[in-house]
């Protein structure tokens, strides 16, 4: 168990160092920001169970088909809180029934 704790300590130290490099000012380098992001991801990975890691890997590039349909039809650029499917259909040229189904 001690070696596991040591691994987490090392990852956390890299995360802390990377954070300090980025927090020095608004003009931090893209390299420093990337190191911070990688250290944060490494910390998350070190704390995940094998099942959590597998689920994360399996779903990391999944985009729900309904969101893809809505984005491809341009629905999000015309949608407000009170916009109906028929109004979106008029603005986008998409079928109002398909819009209604994809947004539910």
Image (cartoon, rainbow, N blue to C red):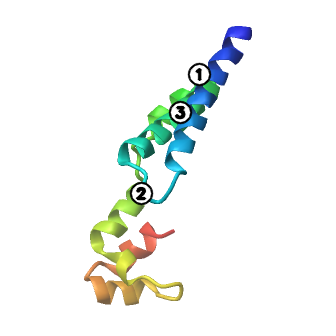
Q: x, y percentage for residue 10?
A: 61, 22
Seen at 35% across and 60% down, the residue is 68
Position above or below: 20 against 50:
below
Give the number of the disc on residue 55: 3
Mark 2 neighbour class, 10 Å CA radius: few under 14, some 14 to 19, many 20 or more: few
Tell which of 16 and 95 is nearer to you. 16
Residue 52 visible in the displayed image: no
Q: CA distance from mark 3 to mark 2?
A: 36 Å
User: Residue 97 versus residue 29: which sits nearer the camera?
Assistant: 29
The quarter holding residue 97 reads bottom left
* Count of labels in the image: 3
Q: Secondary structure at mark 3?
A: helix
Residue at the image position 37 percent from the left and 42 percent from the top? 31
Q: Nearer the viewer, residue 62 or 93?
A: 62
Q: Is 50 situated above or below 91? A: above
In this rendering, the label closer to the viewer, 3 or 2: 2
Tell whether 60 sits left or right of 75: right
Q: Residue 50: which disc? A: 1
Image quadrant of residue 1? top right
Q: Which mark is residue 72?
A: none
Residue 57 seen anywhere in this rendered image of the structure:
yes
User: Would you name the residue on which mark 2 appears?
Assistant: 27
Instruction: Look at 25% across and 83% down and name the residue there.
Output: 93
């Amino acid at each position: 168990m001690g070696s596991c704790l040591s691994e987490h300590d090392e990852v956390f130290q890299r995360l802390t160092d990377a954070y300090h490099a980025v927090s020095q000012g608004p003009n931090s380098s893209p390299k420093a920001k990337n190191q911070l992001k990688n250290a944060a991801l490494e910390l998350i990975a070190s704390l995940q169970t094998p099942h959590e890691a597998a689920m994360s890997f399996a779903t990391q590039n999944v985009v729900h088909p309904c969101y893809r349909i809505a984005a491809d039809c341009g629905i999000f650029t015309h949608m407000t809180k009170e916009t109906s499917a028929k109004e979106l259909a008029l603005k986008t040229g998409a079928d109002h029934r398909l819009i209604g189904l994809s947004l539910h």
